[in-house]
Image (cartoon, grey):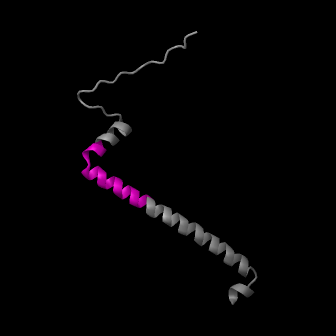
């Protein structure tokens, strides 16, 4: 009853509901992100191929029998 009859009762109620909806949505997003990170941690602990793939992509690591060839971009032909 206080909400309905207070000065900004319904406006405050609607604002709080909107805030709650935003918080619930963010909470759901964080739960999904946590699950994703948990899976990534598990793979990093137990999957050597995944570790190798991450090392190649993020750190630029190459294998011992591999050679890196850098191609310099040249001028375009006329």
Note whether 53 is above or below 69 in the view shown: below
Note whether 14 is above or below 43 in the view shown: below
In the rendered image, residue 29, in percent from the top left (x then y), is placed at 49, 61
Q: Main secondary structure of the magenta part?
A: helix
In the rendered image, residue 6, in percent from the top left (x then y), is placed at 73, 85
Of all residues shown, which one is farthest toward the front?
78
Question: Looking at the image, which residue is at 42% across and 19% down?
Answer: 71
Question: Looking at the image, which residue is at 38% across and 39% down?
Answer: 58
In the rendered image, residue 57, in percent from the top left (x then y), is placed at 37, 38
* Residue 20 image-quadrant placement: bottom right
Note whether 73 is above or below 56 in the view shown: above
Of all residues shown, which one is farthest toward the right?
7
Quadrant showing the C terminus: top right
Note whether 54 is above or below 42 in the view shown: above
In the rendered image, residue 7, in percent from the top left (x then y), is placed at 76, 82
* Residue 53 image-quadrant placement: top left
Comparing 34 with 6, the one in front is 34
Quadrant showing the N terminus: bottom right
Of all residues shown, which one is farthest toward the bottom?
1
In the visual, does 38 lie left or right of 6?
left
Question: Looking at the image, which residue is at 26% across and 52% down?
Answer: 45
In the visual, does 76 lie left or right of 67?
right
User: What's drawn in magenta, residue-wise?
Assistant: 33-51
Question: Looking at the image, which residue is at 67% across and 78% down?
Answer: 13
What count of labels does the image hold?
A: 0
Q: Let me know if residue 30 is in the magenta part.
A: no
* Residue 60 image-quadrant placement: top left
Q: Let me know if residue 48 is in the magenta part.
A: yes
């Amino acid at each position: 009853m206080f909400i309905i009859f207070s000065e900004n009762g319904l406006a405050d109620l609607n604002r709080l509901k909107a805030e709650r909806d935003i918080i619930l949505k963010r909470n759901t997003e964080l739960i999904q992100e946590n699950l994703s990170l948990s899976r990534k941690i598990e793979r990093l602990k137990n999957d050597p191929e995944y570790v190798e793939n991450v090392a190649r992509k993020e750190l630029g690591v190459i294998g011992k029998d591999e050679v890196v060839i850098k191609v310099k971009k040249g001028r375009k032909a006329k």
